[in-house]
Amino acid sequence: MPTPSILVATWDNGLFSVTGKMVHQELANQSVRSLVADGRGRVLAIIGGHSLCRRSSDGEWTAIAKSEFELSCCVPIENVVFVGTDDAHILRVDPDGTQQRLTGFDAVEGRDKWYAGAAIIDGKRVGPPLGIRSMAATCDGTVLLANVHVGGVPRSTNAGLTWRPTIDIDCDIHQVCAHPTRPDIVIAAAAVGLCVSRDAGATWTIEQRGLHAHHCSAVAFGRTDIFVSASTDPFATQGAVYRRPIDSDGPLQPLGGGMPKWIDGKADTNCIATRDSMAAVIDRSGRLYVSHDDGATWSCPFDRLTVPSGLHIC
């Protein structure tokens, strides 16, 4: 069986493919965001802010569509790709590259109350604009979820034609993630804690027990556990990563097993990845942690790769 590769996307230095002890850089000096499997052994990503691209298993990149919009994230449902933008719109990209803006999303109830997640620090504006920060689709393809920062998690059950709000926008969601085989379970990382839905994102509960702080930034499903990162605030110099069985309602537990109590800055949106028994976490400094036993034990094979925008295991 081939050794899995960990893809590390960066904000301005391309992508690093980590296979065992080998590191290979692709797309140098370019922005890479939103690494996601296309369901056919390939990976989708946003390159340079305006191009939706596909990476083959041998590392060849092909542009699928280009847009005048600043693109932020994507999610496939069968042959269609839904793409979020930094100004809070969603595009549908068909297999032939045809693009359609989803006007139903522009009309979602409560949109007029959304606001940017940026803040003024020392007289300077920092943080992201109002936009689609992440997207997810249930494994059966019947529910599409868009994480608006800051605007909650609008939900569509008709392939993006119409949308309904689902969670208080002030929960400040940073990532939404659907279970890979169970269509009823969805999780989200929020400024108020870990959000869990057991009805495909229609309703949510907020869970905080066990966390040292409630500001959560990244989530992922392992084979049996939920993984979530937490920090005191968006600009914290340290953070921590926790786990809990998917079907439990008990407190979250620090990872342990070689993972330090504190990582260097938070693990941000899309910076926890899993595949089979493998899991990976990368912190803001670019320090990569890897587990091959469902998160029981961890090693740090690479230190300070670069500032990451996301992870994917393929």
Image: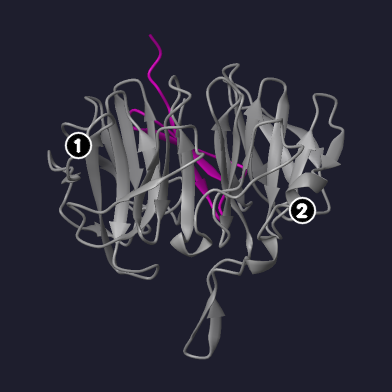
Residue with the mark numbered 1: 298
Where is residue 215? Give x, y as percent: 34, 61
Color scheme of the displayed model: one colour
Where is residue 42? Give x, y as percent: 59, 23
Please give the name of the residue rendered at 54% of the width and 85% of the height, measured from the top-left corner: 124
- On the image, which quarter does residue 302 sit in? top left
Q: How many marks?
A: 2
Q: Earlier in the sequence, mark 1 or mark 2?
A: 2
**Residue type, label 1:** Trp
User: Residue 64 in magenta?
Assistant: no
Nearest to viewer (mark 1 / mark 2): 2
Please give the name of the residue rendered at 47% of the width and 55% of the height, measured from the top-left corner: 173
Where is residue 86? Give x, y as percent: 68, 58
In this rendered view, identify the residue nearer to me: 158 or 116. 158
Q: CA distance from mark 1 to mark 2?
A: 43 Å
Q: The residue tagged with tag 2: helix, strand or loop?
A: helix
Disc number at residue 22? none
Residue with the mark numbered 2: 106
**Residue type, label 2:** Asp
Range shown magenta: 1-27
In this rendered view, identify the residue nearer to me: 146 or 18. 146
Q: The residue tagged with tag 1: helix, strand or loop?
A: loop
Where is residue 314? Give x, y as percent: 47, 25
Q: Residues within 10 Å of mark 1 (few under 14, many from 20)?
A: many
Side (left or right) of 58 relative to 220: right
Q: Residues within 10 Å of mark 2 (few under 14, many from 20)?
A: some
User: Residue 26 in magenta?
Assistant: yes
Side (left or right) of 260 relative to 201: left
Seen in the picture, residue 81 relative to 120 is either above or below; the reply is above
Please give the name of the residue rendered at 54% of the width and 55% of the height, measured from the top-left corner: 152
Seen in the picture, residue 78 relative to 176 is either above or below; the reply is above
